Image (cartoon, rainbow, N blue to C red):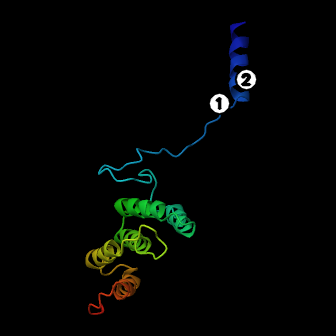
C-alpha cells in the first residue's frame, strides 16, 4: 500500500513537471558592488550572446541597457582584448548621436583610457579613429593620434 502511494506521488510530480530539472541562469542583485546597475555577473565573456544582446539593444534604442552590459563585460573580461573591446563598445554607445543620454566627454575619456591601458589591443586602431572623430565632432581639434 505504501509503495503504491509513493509511485502515485512520483507520477503526479512527473505529470506536473515537478520532476523535470530545468537549468536557469542565476541572476544576482541588479546593482553592482559600487551601487551601479549590473547586467549579470554570472554570465561569462566567452559567451558572445552578451555582445550580441548589447548590439541588439542599441539597434532598438535601449542605449542605457547596452551600456550596462558593456560595463559588466568590461569588469568581468578575462583577457586584455576582451576588456578593450567591451570598453570600446561602451564608449561608442555612450557617445552615440542617437543616445538621448549621450555623454561625449565620458566617451572620449573611455577611448583615451582604452588607448592608455591597452595600446596593443586588437581594437586599438579602431579606437584611435573613433577618438579622432569624437574630438572633431566635439570641436577638440587636438593633434591626431598616431
Q: Decide: is 8 above or below 79.
A: above
- How would you rate the neighbour count of disc 2 (Cα within 10 Å): few for under 14, some for 14-19, many for 20 or more? some
Image quarter (top left, top right, bottom left or bottom right) of the N terminus: top right
52 relative to 97 in the view: left or right: right
- Secondary structure of the residue carrying numbered label 1: loop
Is 134 or 82 nearer to us in this picture? 134
- How would you rate the neighbour count of disc 1 (Cα within 10 Å): few for under 14, some for 14-19, many for 20 or more? few
* Residue occupying the point 40% across, 79% down: 123
The CA distance from mark 2 to mark 1 is 9 Å
Residue receiving disc 2: 11
- Secondary structure of the residue carrying numbered label 2: helix
Q: Which mark is residue 119?
A: none
60 relative to 113 in the view: left or right: right
Is 94 or 86 nearer to us in this picture? 94
* Residue occupying the point 34% across, 70% down: 80
Q: Position of residue 49 (x, y in %)?
A: 54, 62
* Residue occupying the point 41% across, 62% down: 73
Q: Decide: is 13 above or below 22.
A: above
Residue receiving disc 1: 19
Q: Reading the chain from its start, which is encountered first: label 2 or label 1?
A: 2
Amino acid at each position: 500500500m505504501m509503495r503504491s502511494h509513493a509511485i502515485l506521488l512520483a507520477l503526479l510530480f512527473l505529470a506536473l513537471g515537478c520532476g523535470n530539472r530545468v537549468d536557469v541562469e542565476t541572476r544576482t542583485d541588479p546593482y553592482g558592488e559600487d551601487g551601479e546597475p549590473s547586467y549579470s555577473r554570472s554570465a561569462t565573456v566567452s559567451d558572445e550572446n552578451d555582445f550580441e544582446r548589447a548590439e541588439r539593444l542599441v539597434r532598438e534604442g535601449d542605449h542605457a541597457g547596452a551600456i550596462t552590459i558593456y560595463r559588466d563585460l568590461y569588469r568581468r573580461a578575462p583577457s586584455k582584448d576582451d576588456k578593450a573591446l567591451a570598453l570600446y563598445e561602451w564608449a561608442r554607445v555612450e557617445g552615440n548621436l542617437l543616445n538621448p543620454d549621450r555623454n561625449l566627454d565620458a566617451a572620449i575619456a573611455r577611448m583615451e583610457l582604452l588607448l592608455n591601458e591597452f595600446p596593443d589591443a586588437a581594437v586599438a586602431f579602431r579606437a584611435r579613429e573613433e577618438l579622432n572623430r569624437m574630438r572633431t565632432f566635439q570641436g577638440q581639434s587636438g593633434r591626431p593620434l598616431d
